[in-house]
Image (tube, rainbow, N blue to C red):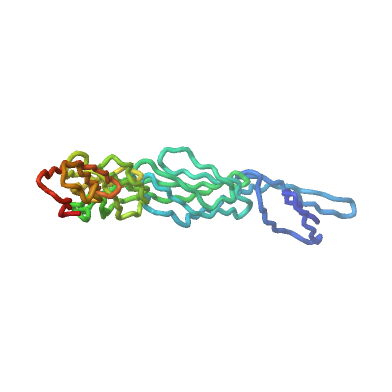
Amino acid sequence: MTVNWGDGTTPDSLPGTATSDTHVYTSTISTSQSFTITVTATNSAGPGSGTTTEVVNDQPPVVTVSSITPPSPFVGESVTVSFTATDPDGTVASISVNWGDGTALDSLPGTAISDTHVYSVGGTFTMIITATDNSGSTGQASGSITTVLVGVPTVTVNSPTPNPATTGQTVTVIFTVSSTASVTGITVNWGDGTTPDSLAGTATSDTHTYISTGNAKSQIFTIVVTATNSAGPGSGTTTETVNDQSPTVSIVSILPNPIACQARQSRIHMSIWSGAPSRSSLLQLTTAVQRARLQDRLRLPFQ
């Protein structure tokens, strides 16, 4: 006696006295499939058969969400879901992820174990992962994600040191940045028309040297520190008073020296520095020294 279970497996061979048989269907070509079971008994006259049918339903895939990182992402921040998808009676053919915010579903291969997404709005969303097996059956798992709105950074700027400063002196400004999202960059505008300094998002201080106060003896500059995150820029300000350096005068020489008593001219060569030495200029001062009554040669007291 033989039993053909209709699924392509080898028919079972039984003794002539058998009255039953068992079988396990391992797969279907669709979510449900009907199989024809044929039992054949053979005697000296030949074989005789009887049939029946068995309807087998496919087992759906099993999907499990392992983690959502971070569980409460900021708007504009990447969130990652990790998961597993298995099929007890076949293979997982494909996976889709619906992030619940109205964006298009992510289509992944059946071997995928994670997916990432960026939410553009705040709120609570239900994320659904759907696995489809080789028979078309589906299994799902879901998770809840709450996004947090991001505000622009808050920047607090301390008073610079030293304050006041003089031209050519190094000025240091210290600041703190508070942000609910990662700070991507910081700029410091020193207010004197120079190119703003570009700093890393983790910076807490900067330095600068003012080289001029223009036509004034003293000038007040506004320092603006700007930090940027995914929500945009946020700024803080402070002021720095810069005083111009007084000129420095140095006598280089007096020519001629000594001079005769009769009316002659003497040249005094002087160097004048205004502020930093790089701004030096040479002033040639000509003075007329006339001493008609002197009989001898005259030496100036400051030679």
Residue 15 occupies quadrant: bottom right
Residue 194 occupies quadrant: top left
Is residue 141 at least partly visible in the picture? yes
In the image, 191: left or right of 100? left
Q: How many marks?
A: 0
Residue at horizontal 62%, vertical 51%? Answer: 91
Is residue 242 at least partly visible in the picture? no
**Residue 205 at what x, y percent from top left?**
30, 54
Q: Nearer the viewer, residue 22 or 280?
A: 280
Residue at horizontal 47%, vertical 54%? Answer: 65
**Residue 78 at what x, y percent from top left?**
43, 48
Placement of the N terminus among the 4 image quadrants: bottom right
**Residue 21 at what x, y percent from top left?**
72, 58
In the image, 97: left or right of 197? right
In the image, 159: left or right of 186? left
**Residue 288 at what x, y percent from top left?**
16, 41
In the image, 24: left or right of 138? right
Q: Residue furthest left?
A: 293
Q: Residue furthest right?
A: 44
Q: Nearer the viewer, residue 129 or 261?
A: 261
Placement of the C terminus among the 4 image quadrants: bottom left
Q: Nearer the viewer, residue 71 or 157?
A: 157
Residue 76 occupies quadrant: top left
Q: Nearer the viewer, residue 235 or 125?
A: 235
Residue at horizontal 76%, vertical 60%? Answer: 18
